[in-house]
Image (tube, helix red, strand yellow):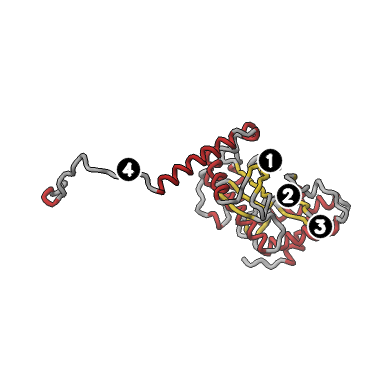
Amino acid sequence: MSEEYGLLDQENADAPGDEWEEIDVTDTEADRIARQRDREFSEFRERIKDTEQFKVEQSVFDDATLAALYKLVQDGYVRAFGGPISSGKEATVYNALADDEREEVAVKIYRINASDFQDMREYLVGDPRFEELSGNKKRVVLAWVRKEFANLKRAARAGVRVPEPIAVQRNVLVMEFLGNDGERAPTLDDAHLENPETAYEVVREYMRRLYDAGLVHGDLSEYNIIVHDGELCIIDLGQAVTLHHPNSGDFLTRDCANVAAFFQRQGMDVTGDELEAWVREHADPNV
């Protein structure tokens, strides 16, 4: 089989241009703004990298994370970066200064390179919000951060006391800071409970409201319930799944068992089975 390859007809083509034609290389306002932003980002990167915290946590502050932090600073969400207030295998939470209205915020930075990829996939695969997610590790971590932001918003709308989600940029999440003067409020495990019965009723109701909103925390225990200004606050909703998730029932059973076990140690006569039955009976999820 023969093929014919046509040649462009030069008859109607433009004549060759003057190789010395003038090209406008003068600065535009956009050029000046871009250079100024580059200089500011370089100064910001050097300022962060010069801190003692960077020397300890170099795996947290890669260039992509620094760029995300810089964008959050430029947008006014963060004014000054503070020290760490908690650290886990997947993320570190820092205290930071915000604007005059909010004063302090919590900045949660997920480590893209160090995060436990397989553990995250357990909570993402099966969630209809992430059906198209590939196995790329970076995409999984970035999806996880946006998932936590969305879960916090959903929980708040359902009347659950959670840190107010403020902004998200790549692997960085900015939230309400639960604490005072740079010190995070104690967890339920650390706090002295004068009235565990009331605390149990509040946690139980928040679990019902989450379930009513179509969410299961998935890792609820005394270690991610904060006591702040006389309120119980649920934190760490990154792994929370919708009721469509194939393991949502197992996650609810585990949450109920963990919560009941803690309050049993406070002298209460409660069981995980009873707690789960109460949540399911009193919730009316719209799913």
Quadrant including the C terminus:
bottom right
Q: Nearest to the eye among marks 1 and 3: give it.
A: 1
Query: Which percent across, then down, holds residue 209?
Result: 71, 63
Q: Residues within 10 Å of mark 1 (few under 14, many from 20)?
A: some
Q: Is residue 141 visible?
A: no
Label 4 packing within 10 angstroms: few (<14), some (14-19), many (20+)? few
Label 3 residue SS: helix
- Numbered disc 4: secondary structure: loop
Compared across the picture, whether 257 is left or right of 213 comes to right
Q: Position of residue 22 (x, y in %)?
A: 24, 43
Q: Callout 2, which amino acid?
A: Asn
> In this rendering, which labeled residue sits more in front, label 4 or label 1?
4
**Amino acid type assigned to the residue bearing label 4 in the image:** Val
Q: Residue 113's spot in the image, x, y percent?
A: 56, 38
In terms of depth relative to the viewer, which is nearer, 93 or 239? 93
Q: Residue type at mark 3: give it.
A: Tyr
Separation (CA) of disc 2 from disc 3: 14 Å
- At x 73%, y 49%, the residue is 224
Where on the picture, by quarter, is residue 21? Answer: top left
Q: Is mark 4 in CB contact (under 8 Å) with mark 3?
A: no
Badge 2 element: helix
| CA–CA distance in space, label 4 to label 2 | 57 Å
Q: Name the residue located 13 percent from the left edge and 48 percent from the top edge.
A: 10
Residue where numbered disc 1 is placed? 84
Q: Earlier in the sequence, mark 1 or mark 3?
A: 1
Task: Please tell me the numbered disc located at residue 200.
Answer: 3
* Residue 25's disc number: 4
Label 1: which secondary element: strand
Residue at the image point whose x is 78% and y is 57% from the top: 231
Taking the spot 51% from the left edge, 50% from the top edge, the residue there is 133
